[in-house]
Amino acid sequence: MTDTPRRFARIAPHEWEGLSGMQVLERVIDGRLPQLPMAGTLGFAVVEAAEGQAVVAGEPDEGHVNLIGTVHAGWAATVLDTAMACAVISTLQPHESFTTMEFKISLLKPVQAGMGELRGTGVLLQRGRRGAFAEARLQDATGKVLAHATTTCIIVPKT
């Protein structure tokens, strides 16, 4: 991840007002808006976004390890869910919001503390008026895929 200090906080509704999803992501990435609070807890951040794509990067550490000594699956699931969500968010118009209906994760290789930066890359597969489908891959620095996920989201009017 970058050496730039990051803020982690909930984005207030007025800060989203009139912005497309892509505009919100651009502001999160460049620091004008904060990263999501859970990202601070789990040591990751949204680092790249383009329409229909997003990258989340983080370094799992000893604080993320489960009883058997590997990084808890929830860490990978949260990184991948965030990458997929941001891929969907990148397509939202100012009057739209969304929610995840379901997601599935497949853990392909163990994630270990100290592996260095891992990147979750989310890609929009299809977007309609009322739904969106995305997938994401968690990869290490060599490009090895550690986990894969898919999601189904519902597009709703912003309230």
Image (cartoon, rainbow, N blue to C red):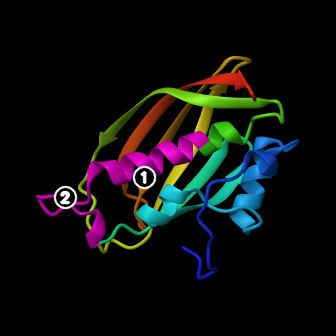
Regarding residue 140, the answer to whether it shows in the image is yes
Q: Is mark 2 on a helix, strand or loop?
A: loop
Q: Which-is-in-front pick, marks 2 and 1?
A: 2
Where residue 44 sits: x, y (%)? 49, 63
Which sits earlier in the primary sequence, circle 2 or circle 1? 2
Specify whether residue 79 is painted magenta: yes
Where residue 14 sits: x, y (%)? 80, 47
Segment tinted magenta in the rendering: 62-85
Residue position for label 2 = 66
Specify whether residue 15 is painted magenta: no
Furthest residue in direction bottom, as rendered: 3
Q: Is residue 121 above or below residue 30?
A: above
Classified by dominant secondary structure, the portion drawn in magenta counts as helix
Where residue 74 sits: x, y (%)? 33, 48
Amino acid at circle 2: Asn
Q: Is residue 52 left or right of residue 123?
A: right
Q: What element carries label 1?
A: strand
Question: Foreground residue, 8 or 61?
Answer: 8
Where residue 154 sits: x, y (%)? 61, 22
Instruction: Quadrant for residue 2, please give it.
Output: bottom right
Q: In this view, does 64 lie above or below 146?
A: below
Which residue sits at x=70%, y=60%? 28
Question: Foreground residue, 69 or 148?
Answer: 69
Residue position for label 1 = 138
Image quarter hosting the N terminus: bottom right
Amino acid at circle 1: Leu
Image quarter hosting the C terminus: top right
Mark identifier at residue 35: none
Regarding residue 146, the answer to whether it shows in the image is no
Q: In this view, does 5 lie above or below 76?
A: below
